[in-house]
Image (cartoon, rainbow, N blue to C red):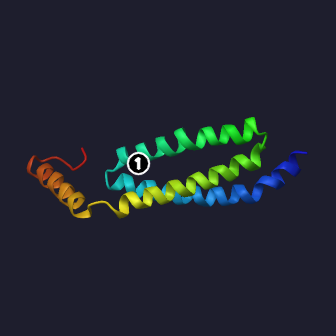
Amino acid sequence: EVARECHKIWPILSIYIFILNIFGINSGIIRALGMQLKMAMVIFILLWCCALPTVYFFTVKKGGGLPVMWSINCVFYTILNVALSALYATADWKAISDGIHRKTKTSIIQGKVPDE
């Protein structure tokens, strides 16, 4: 019984793991750019306000089980990856660069290591 259920979800879970790794890359880029607050808002709205109720409805109320849950997670994490990519693709890279240079210059003048 357990092996049969694992066999059902394995392909979907493999796709989810790949998508989750893309999320790791996207979140690293966003953190490096100092856009954590925007990322947090997107994650809260998409995962907590949209994905969680959807997963609950289709897996618990409709009885979809684990295959449905992992399928829904794949869909929402794909949407999340697109949204996060759009965040840094549309960011003002010049302003971010200027802010980093300004912080670094101020730190050097004050004799501090940047990000101290």
Residue lying at the far left of the rendered structure: 109
Q: As rendered, which of 65 and 106 lies closer to the eye?
A: 65
Toward the right, the furthest residue is 1
Q: Front-most of 71 and 62? A: 62
Query: Which picture quadrant has residue 2?
Result: top right
Q: What percent of the width, then of the height, locates residue 22?
A: 53, 60
Could you say where residue 82 lies in the image, as x and y percent from the top left?
Answer: 48, 60
Residue that appears at 12% across and 48% down? 111
The amino acid marked with disc number 1 is: Met
Q: Is residue 99 left or right of residue 19?
A: left
Which quadrant does the N terminus fall into? top right
Q: Residues within 10 Å of mark 1 (few under 14, many from 20)?
A: some
Front-most of residues 105 and 92: 92
Residue positioned 76% across, 39% down in the render: 62
Is 39 on the left or on the right of 68, as rendered? left
28 sits to left or right of 98: right
The residue that mark 1 highlights is: 39
How many numbered markers are drawn?
1
Q: Quadrant of residue 98?
A: bottom left
Which residue shows up at 61% across the image and 61% down it? 18
The residue positioned 47% from the left and 41% from the top of the image is 44
The picture places residue 108, in percent across and down from the top left corner, at: 13, 52
Compared to residue 21, the image places residue 48 above or below, namely above
Q: Quadrant of the C terminus?
A: top left
Q: Residue furthest top?
A: 61
Q: Regarding mark 1 in the picture, which secondary structure is present there?
A: helix
Foreground pick, 109 / 6? 6
Residue 11 point in image, percent of width and height: 75, 60
